[in-house]
Image (cartoon, rainbow, N blue to C red):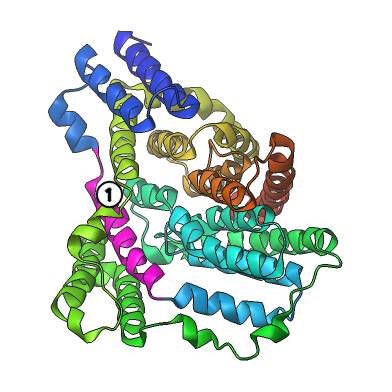
Amino acid sequence: MDFMQIAAGTIFLASIILVITGWIDSVLAAMLGILMMIFVGVYSDIDAFKIVDWNVIAILLSIWIISGYFGKSGVPDFLAAIILKLSKGNVAVFVTVLGMLAGYVSMLIDNVVVVLMFAPVVFHACRRFNFPAFAPVMFVGLCANFMGTAMLLGDLPPQMLHSVSGIEFSGFLWHSGRPSSFFILNVSYIITCAYFYWIFSKKYKGVRMDVASMADEKPLDHIKDKPFAIVSCGVFLLTIIAMALRPVFGYTLGFIAMWGAITLILIFEIFKGRFTIETPNVEQVLSELDWRAIFFYVSLFALVGGLEHAGVIKTISNLITPLIKTSLIAGSTLLYWVTAPIVGIVEHDAYILTMLYVIRDLAKETGMNPWPLYWMLLWAGTLGSNLTIAGAPALFVAKSMGEKEDQRKVGLKEFLGMTVPYVVVSLIFCYIPAMLVWVIPFAK
């Protein structure tokens, strides 16, 4: 490795260590890394700006804006009220089904936003029926982080895969003549949730919720303004459909998502007098966005771009090429089971983006099909990140909210007592169908 490669690799690792340890603010650490790369000559300031995939950033911003309105519509509370009644007082059923619902919603909405949307519903039930909130809200966080990679919109890794490979919305349902992310992850998700239903059945044995007291309550009462809910959900749905049909329109996903967000804002600005609830103005909408996360993701693209610009990614690609050339099965297995523990302690977005570029360059040089490796990386990277709060910001939010609600500090043993079984079960039951559908058929 030459000086530039060593410099880029050292700066990148130092930045990620600062992000993980929290010695300084994560955004500041990432931006300092970019400044250092520019200072030592890895790339110019213009190159750093051009490296960022602004299409992905536009998707994130737009979907967060739309999901903010969706969260205020009352629809999540409406769905939770239905689940509460359908559970017939069984806490295990309520917690499991609510968690599963959170996971499916996270296919379209950022997982942190999903936790913020569903946590109040969990707390309402816990307060009303007097049982601790930590385990239920943690389960919501784990599920929300699980299914974000099932579709293109829910989490950053699938959007990064779109950026690197050009995969479209439909590719997450069916790709290369076989079921892809949605179906493979669903197999593991259903089995994992079934396992935790068994765990919750033992944990909440003898605990019942008196849903008879809710006989006079109607789930629709949670939707305070039906026209507001219809508009929010309607524009959300139309935006998703338009993004799924992107090849027909010919526009980028970010442009389509931005049109959806702007349309929603304009409707509520122009017709605000027609709604009975107070609609947020543009300033409020923008103030509620997680700008720290946006700047972090921008910085992440620039940092990884520095590795590529200096040739570090090509060097890594050359190191792993012999193993994958020898055996796709062995190479995919190693990638999967090494990725999972790494992303449990390392912010998984940075690792996944780096390795996506590695796989892309490897495929270009060897002529191999990159998709078995792309999928194994993406799935292991998503599922393994559920191990700690360092790997998944959604878990940090869920843990903090659960501790605050229960008014106690949760120990590491209790925390890992939930995350470790969840990660192990989900990884095993994703690995099996992934190998059968995506690796073995392509192995020579």
User: Where is 425 relative to 94, above or below?
Assistant: above
| Magenta-drawn segment | 52-73
Examine the image and state in which quarter residue 339 appears.
top right
Label 1 Cα neighbours within 10 Å, binned few <14 / some 14-19 / many ≥20: some
Residue in view at x 44 percent, y 22 percent = 23
For residue 441, say whether it is visible: no
Where the N terminus falls, by quadrant? top left
| Among the 4 quarters of the image, the one containing residue 258 | bottom left
Q: Position of residue 323 (x, y in %)?
A: 58, 29
Kind of residue at badge 1: Ile
Residue 55 covered by magenta stretch: yes
| Residue name at image x 40 percent, y 82 percent | 224
Query: In the picture, which quadrant includes the C terminus?
Result: top right
Q: Main secondary structure of the magenta part?
A: helix
The image position of residue 230, as x and y in percent, is 34, 84
Total marks shown come to: 1
Residue that appears at 61% across and 56% down = 137
Residue at which label 1 appears: 57
Name, please, the residue furthest toward the bottom: 216
